[in-house]
Image: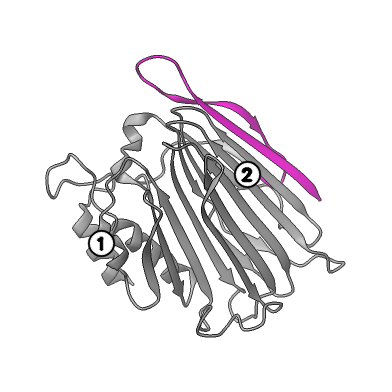
Amino acid sequence: MEAAAELGVERAPGPAGRTRISRLHSEAPYLLRPTHPVAAEPVPCWRLVGQAPARVALVAGAGGPLGGDRLSLDIDVGPGAVLVLRAVAATLVLPGPHGQRSYAHVTARVAAGGTLVWLPGPTIAARGCDHHGTTRIDLAPDARLLVREELVLGRTGEQPGTVRQRLRVTVAGVPLHDQELHLGAGAPGWTGPAVTAGCAAVGSLLFVDPTLDVPAAAHLVDVDADSATLPVGHSGRLVTALAVDALALRRRLDLGLCALGPPPLEPAGAPDGDGMNLPARVAALATSG
């Protein structure tokens, strides 16, 4: 199966500055649906509620990707626009009937002053799959980005297939971050201490904001020995983590995001959108893990 989905947003004229959807095309299994906030915004310090972002959910309209599938998603964020795009469920990558490889490509462009929050949800690499996934994002010099990737290696009690996953982010065409993972049955040494150390879940969270004063010491704030927060150029931070399962991975990535700092220009201890201030949320995440 071949399928291509497209999404474009632009900032509406006027003082409200609301972001509106200018282009939306879905093809199963990629179904795009406008939605409303379902929880606290993932980056409180950006004050997305006040910026009236466009929010879109990615809904699976069919199973897969299956072996032989070629899927693509193209995203355009216009000047000054804000888009929060999230999947509503995990993606289960399955083998096809003829042993072919599956492909999923995401391409995004974020124009001057734009913001993209891309939360695709966990990808589960089932036994026997052979999957290549790529995400390429080009940012204007003053654009902002949060992209989160979570990869679960096999379902409960099974060994994974083979998965290759790449994230490449450029700023005005100049590389900022380029990371590729090759894991599973077709990747020699993938369970070794230099790769996953036998963990079943691996993930990352890339945060880019050229205007925000991200604490210089943020790279020292690690959740534990299986996670790290590192600087990316002068404008970003990368949180990476390993975990025994998807839930533990999500908690580690959440805690890494919290470590970047509280919302600016608010009194100390002021609550974020979930009713908890930053220290309270960090404590809750740490104790729940």
Q: Extreme right residue here?
A: 98
Can you give x and y, in whole percent of width and height, for residue 140 in the image?
A: 49, 36
What residue is at 58 percent from the left and 41 percent from the top? 108
Left or right, 275 with respect to 85, comes to: left
In this rendering, the answer to whether 3 lies above or below 187 is above
Question: Which image quadrant: the C terminus?
Answer: bottom left
Label 1 sits on a secondary structure element that is helix
- On the image, which quarter does residue 92 sit in? bottom right
**In whole angstroms, how far apart are the C-alphas of marks 1 and 2?**
32 Å
Q: Nearer the viewer, residue 212 or 90?
A: 212
Q: Residues within 10 Å of mark 2 (few under 14, many from 20)?
A: some
Specify the principal SS of the magenta part.
strand
In this rendering, the answer to whether 97 lies above or below 178 is below
Can you give x and y, in whole percent of width and height, for residue 248 in the image?
A: 42, 71
Can you give x and y, in whole percent of width and height, for residue 190 in the image?
A: 60, 80
Query: What stretch of residues is rendered in magenta?
Result: 1-30
Q: Which residue is mark 2?
A: 107
Left or right, 226 with respect to 271, comes to: right
Q: Nearer the viewer, residue 171 or 183?
A: 171
Q: Residues within 10 Å of mark 1 (few under 14, many from 20)?
A: few
In this rendering, the answer to whether 150 lies above or below 243 is above
Badge number at residue 217 = 1
As shown in the figure, which amino acid type bears the numbered disc 2?
Answer: Thr
Residue 16 covered by magenta stretch = yes
